[in-house]
Image (cartoon, rainbow, N blue to C red):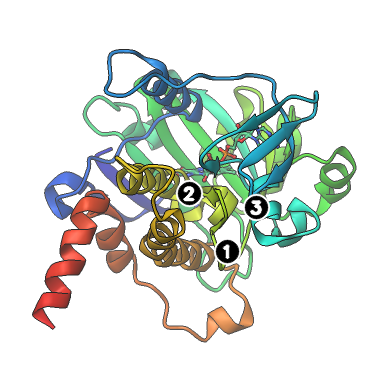
Amino acid sequence: MTHLWLRNYNNDEIRTIHFDTRKEFGGAPSILTRRANLQSELLRFATSPDFPGAPAEIIRGAQVTRVDALVGKVWAEDGRSFEGDLIVGADGINSTTRAAVLDDEVPSNRIKLHDLLCFITRVPIETVQTDKTLKYLATPSSQAGLVTFYLPEQSKSRKRVLIYHTSPHELQVLGYTSEEEFVEKFDSMKTAIIKDIPAERVVNEFATEFSEHIVGLFKHSQIDAWRLRDIDTCETWYRGKCVLIGDAAHAVTPHAGQGCNITIEDAEALAYLLKGARPSDDLAGVLEKFTSLRRERAQFVLRRSREMGNLQSEEEKKLEPISPEKFSMIMHSYQGVEHALKLMESSSNAA
Ligand SMILES: Cc1cc2nc3c(=O)[nH]c(=O)nc-3n(C[C@H](O)[C@H](O)[C@H](O)COP(=O)(O)OP(=O)(O)OC[C@H]3O[C@@H](n4cnc5c(N)ncnc54)[C@H](O)[C@@H]3O)c2cc1C
């Protein structure tokens, strides 16, 4: 990713930022990709014999319905059960594991709705190559990135449109708006994704506020509606032989584009802290250290995501907003938990 474009509803430039996280912050390069590509690459890393450690065994089709956090055992819908030294609950915002760790009656207890959904569609790169007004998006091999189209500041609307490259051949287009009309369907279907929304419906949603060049991008392929939710970062992330990572512990809305990143950071931190650990070791001590290293950062992302989407509670509105510069610096200068621990150690030595 090389560019961030900030534009208004009419596609007029507000600001263009040359975005090189490696050069500017010393952290990892910033990459845009489709979720499916990332998942298959992570699966390859986990299961390939070419990397250190035993390849992970993947058991498919096991829907976990019960977790005993103290014993370290899970039961699947089909009656099978699995036991281990540690259960890592990476089971997303509806986490069954979280309910067991926090003694919640139902997994959905903590989920917060914000009257917001996101229409998502994909657009072939040729579409922007033939539209002069969108030419800046037409050459991802030399400039790839993300453009956000904003409504005027005085507008009370939470509508926003985003476009970003997901490969040299394709863009993803997102439109945020109220979920009002879809609430009943989301609830009755017990789903967070409604597929195949008619293009005309989506175009009408944005056509009065955004230029036709932007809105027209919703006419090219299937559009799905995603319900946007988050949870307040959990107070505790572990119990007995069970620990939560990712959305299970700290689901955020996608406004800051960091939910998946902090999930991967969690996994890296946990793996680092558990390296060489034995079942007889002080597991609670390790999991407490893990939580204390990760919780504040997850909360920081939650706060910034809510600020970006105007989704703060009355209490959160009283806090000093996090500046984009501070957020970028803290997120993009991260170099893994070993580095974070060294920084903490040197700052406590200096104090
Ligand atoms: C519209 C949208 C856009 C986003 N954009 C970005 C972005 O640009 N950048 C970014 O960093 N993040 C983004 N995110 C956030 C990101 O998708 C999540 O933070 C990330 O997927 C969390 O990973 P996870 O592994 O914790 O949970 P998930 O990805 O939800 O994975 C949980 C897994 O657990 C499985 N599971 C759940 N319950 C059970 C059970 N009982 N038994 C067995 N399996 C179970 C699920 O099937 C799933 O495979 C976006 C999210 C949304 C909704």
Q: Is residue 173 shown above or below 337? A: above
Visible residue check, residue 127: yes
Q: Nearer the viewer, residue 51 or 319?
A: 51
Q: Residues within 10 Å of mark 1 (few under 14, many from 20)?
A: some
Q: Quadrant of ligand 1?
A: top right
- Answer with left or right where residue 116 lies relative to residue 250: right
Give SS at disc 3: helix
Q: Tell me what residue is drawn at x 9 percent, y 79 percent.
A: 350
Picture coordinates of residue 319 (x, y %)?
A: 47, 83
Q: Disc 2 or 3, which lies upstream in sequence?
A: 3
Question: What residue did someone put label 1 on?
Answer: 234
Q: Disc 3 or 1, which lies upstream in sequence?
A: 3
Which residue is situated farthest in the left direction here? Answer: 350
Picture coordinates of residue 257 (x, y %)?
A: 44, 49
Give SS at disc 1: loop
Q: Report which quarter residue 325 is drawn in.
A: bottom left
Q: Tell me what residue is drawn at x 22 percent, y 60 percent.
A: 341
Marking on residue 98? 3
Q: Disc 2 or 1, which lies upstream in sequence?
A: 1
Q: CA distance from mark 3 to mark 1?
A: 9 Å
Instruction: Give the foreground label among 2 and 3.
Output: 3
Picture coordinates of residue 226 (x, y %)?
A: 67, 41
* CB under 8 Å between discs 3 and 1: yes
Marking on residue 259? 2
Q: Is mark 2 within 8 Å of ligand 1?
A: yes
Q: Is residue 39 shown above or below 278? A: above
